[in-house]
Amino acid sequence: MKKIAILILFLLPALSCSDSDSNNAKFAQLQTEIDSLNKKILTLQPGLGEVMSAIQLHHAKLWFAGINENWKLAAFEIGEIKEQLEAAENLKASRWEVASLPMIYPPIDSISHAIASQDENGFRGAFDFLTFTCNKCHETNKFEFNVIATPKAEPVVNQIFKLQK
């Protein structure tokens, strides 16, 4: 019996080492797969330019919804802008420019309030504030050549901005 116990004591470390080696190999393989998937995910995410282009489209659509007093559509469009801003903030690790994004939140709050109040004049002023702040953010980040303006023509031809009764 003592011989079996001694034999087990000698074999146990050897068995656990082989299990440990096997576990380490499995862990290394899993880590490689995780790293590969993370790289693929990064290539699927839009870049900051794509996110900003989406914001620009929603900015234009917001304008036409607001001046036509289509408050539900305006609320939808400001919500879309907020979503895109969240997407931009998720790029913090790779884009230093994102650090100045918080400057956009006061105008977002102003325009949201005007929409909730269904105040066309307040909307126009808040929209100007939003547009001004977009350009200020561009200047801050050395993208001053990218100037945003109040739209003069509807951004898409297949959408009706006037409230349908």
Image (tube, rainbow, N blue to C red):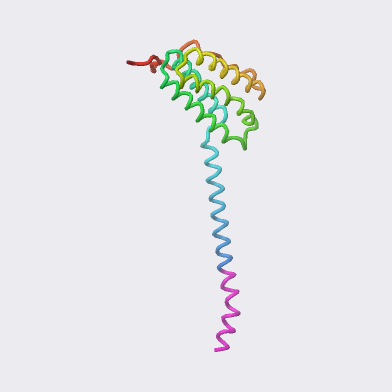
Residue at the left extreme of this rendering: 165
Looking at the rendering, which quadrant does residue 137 occupy? top right
Q: Nearer the viewer, residue 48 or 65?
A: 65
Q: Which of 112 and 128 is in front in this view?
A: 112
Residue located at (52% from left, 35% from top): 45
Count of all numbered marks drawn on residues in the image: 0
Q: Which of 10 and 59 is in front in this view?
A: 59
In the rendered view, tell whether residue 25 sits above or below residue 73: below
Residue 37 place in picture, x, y as percent: 52, 46
Looking at the rendering, which quadrant does residue 68 occupy? top left
Residue at the top extreme of this rendering: 152
In the rendered view, tell whether residue 79 sits above or below residue 152: below
Residue at the front extreme of this rendering: 117
Q: Can residue 132 be seen in this view?
A: yes
Residue 118 place in picture, x, y as percent: 45, 17
Q: Can residue 155 be seen in this view?
A: no
Residue located at (57% from left, 17% from top): 129
Quarter of the image with the N terminus is bottom right
**Residue segment shown in magenta:** 1-18
Left or right for 13, reference 54: right
In the rendered view, tell whether residue 19 sits above or below residue 98: below
Residue 9 among those drawn in magenta:
yes
Q: Nearer the viewer, residue 60 or 2?
A: 60
Residue at the bottom extreme of this rendering: 1
Residue 96 place in picture, x, y as percent: 65, 32
Q: Magenta region, mostly helix, strand or loop?
A: helix
Residue located at (59% from left, 80% from top): 9
Residue located at (58% from left, 25% from top): 104
Left or right for 164, reference 151: left
Quarter of the image with the C terminus is top left
